[in-house]
Image (cartoon, rainbow, N blue to C red):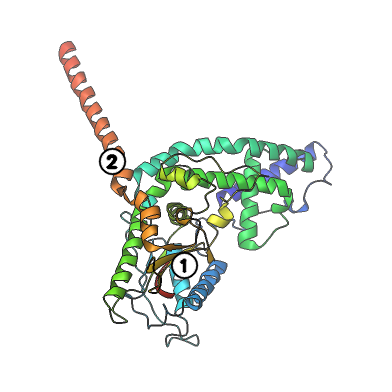
């Protein structure tokens, strides 16, 4: 929000300088004159906007229609548990989704809505849905890499800044270009305005700017470092365990209403991206084998080359992963299969011969097991504790040295995951 207030002030300076130099105003976009941030005076952002509520409400309806046999029972929190992070936007997303999912199944109002529970863990200890917040090693890694990511972006921003200066006759800096690109994304996604900030850039420039965003999330949240996604092992373990419980309920003939049928989770891009990486989604060629060997991957190829890793696809607003466990008793090779959808579309898994339908045993052995051998605390906190112990030891040594010196001196859908 403050960045856009600063941009408004910066545009005033650029326009004033252009006047002082008596430059022609013909090339200057008319909306620059008197522009103010649409979010002026708004100090806190991050709420779920009306469009987001609508998206999630209708997503809930579509999911129910897609899997009618899973959502044919009356709501009970042990059959359809709903969990969200302890962040207002995430819990609001869960409520909007649940209103769609259970619409017409209650007695509240003309829409026949019904009440349902949304459970949250403490932000300080939620290692299943907010693992990035609890992982000290990840926080350290991210802080250390952010300057390098900014450096990677600089050549693209400089190139586009030069083009904007020539195109509009204003002395745009790298920072100006970055702010205008952010404004473009906010106007397009939140206000459906496409002809102001977005209109400043050519299609090829937009492609390059999108690539810089993709590189950023690749390095800081995706395949750029194995810690980015391996810290999501508690969520993957939770998914595997819930499917194993569903298989047990099926095998032992539990009566309907006595077992969980769908586990619904609502979190953030920092949750969705690592989980997608744990499944091996959006990889190119032999990259799946490389992440299994814990080898680093190359950055996404720069335009005009094609790439699978695109932020607009990997983690859009209301992005979602759906894992469905199918019971196939007539299949000779496997009785249970995992079907994976990303944003409501089947997506191939390299670990399962690029199929979106994977035998459960293969899913566990080929996709999950290489990650589940890692322990969350060992990944996230051991080095920090060792470092703290070393620092403490060093401080004690220095203190003792100082004291010493002083002395010297002085088929059938069976289970669902979202």
Q: Give the answer, above or below, for where 252 lies relative to 193.
A: below
Question: CA–CA distance between discs 1 and 2?
Answer: 34 Å
Q: Give the answer, above or below, for where 250 lies relative to 86.
A: below
Q: Residue at 44% across / 62% down in the picture?
A: 358
Q: Is residue 412 left or right of residue 158?
A: left
- Residue corresponding to mark 2: 382
Label 2 environment density (alpha carbons within 10 Å; few <14, some 14–19, many ≥20): some
- Residue corresponding to mark 1: 93
Q: Earlier in the sequence, mark 1 or mark 2?
A: 1
Label 1 environment density (alpha carbons within 10 Å; few <14, some 14–19, many ≥20): many
Secondary-structure class at tag 1: helix
Q: Is residue 273 visible?
A: yes
Residue 159: x percent and y percent? 69, 37
* Numbered marks: total: 2
Q: Is residue 73 left or right of residue 155?
A: left
Residue 382: x percent and y percent? 28, 41
- Say which of 227 and 387 sits in front: 227
- Say which of 304 and 220 sits in front: 304
């Amino acid at each position: 929000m403050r960045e856009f207030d600063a941009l408004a002030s910066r545009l005033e300076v650029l326009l004033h300088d252009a006047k002082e130099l008596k430059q022609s105003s013909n090339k200057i976009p008319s909306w620059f004159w008197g522009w103010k941030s649409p979010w002026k005076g708004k100090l806190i952002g991050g709420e779920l906007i009306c469009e987001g509520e609508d998206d999630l409400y209708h997503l809930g309806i579509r999911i129910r229609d897609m899997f009618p046999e899973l959502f044919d029972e009356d709501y009970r929190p042990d059959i359809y548990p709903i969990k969200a992070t302890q962040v207002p936007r995430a819990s609001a997303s869960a409520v909007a989704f649940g209103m769609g999912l259970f619409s017409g199944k209650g007695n509240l109002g003309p829409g026949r809505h019904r009440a349902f529970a949304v459970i949250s863990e403490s932000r300080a200890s939620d290692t299943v849905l907010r693992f990035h917040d609890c992982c000290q090693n990840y926080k350290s890694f991210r802080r250390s890499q952010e300057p390098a990511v900014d450096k990677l972006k600089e050549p693209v921003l400089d190139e586009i800044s030069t083009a904007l200066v020539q195109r509009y006759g204003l002395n745009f800096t790298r920072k100006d270009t970055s702010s205008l690109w952010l404004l473009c994304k906010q106007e397009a996604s939140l206000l459906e305005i496409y002809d102001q900030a977005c209109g400043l850039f050519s299609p090829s420039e937009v492609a390059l700017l999108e690539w810089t965003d993709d590189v950023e999330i690749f390095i800081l949240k995706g395949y750029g470092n194995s810690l980015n996604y391996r810290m999501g092992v508690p969520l993957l373990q939770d998914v595997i365990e819930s499917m194993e419980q569903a298989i047990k309920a099926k095998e032992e003939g539990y009566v309907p209403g006595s077992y969980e049928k769908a586990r619904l989770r609502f979190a953030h891009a920092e949750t969705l991206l690592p989980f997608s990486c744990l499944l091996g989604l959006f990889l190119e060629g032999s990259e799946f084998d490389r992440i299994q060997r814990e080898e680093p991957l190359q950055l996404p190829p720069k335009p005009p080359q094609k790439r699978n890793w695109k932020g607009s696809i990997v983690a859009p607003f209301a992005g979602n992963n759906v894992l469905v466990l199918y019971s196939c008793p007539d299949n000779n090779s496997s009785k249970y299969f995992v079907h994976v959808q990303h944003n409501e579309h089947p997506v191939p898994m390299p670990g399962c011969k690029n199929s979106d339908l994977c035998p459960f045993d293969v899913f566990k052995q080929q996709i999950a097991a290489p990650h589940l051998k890692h322990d969350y605390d060992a990944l996230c906190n051991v080095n920090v504790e060792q470092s703290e112990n070393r620092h403490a030891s060093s401080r004690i040594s220095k203190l003792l040295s100082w004291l010493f010196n002083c002395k010297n001196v002085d088929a059938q859908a069976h289970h669902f995951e979202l």
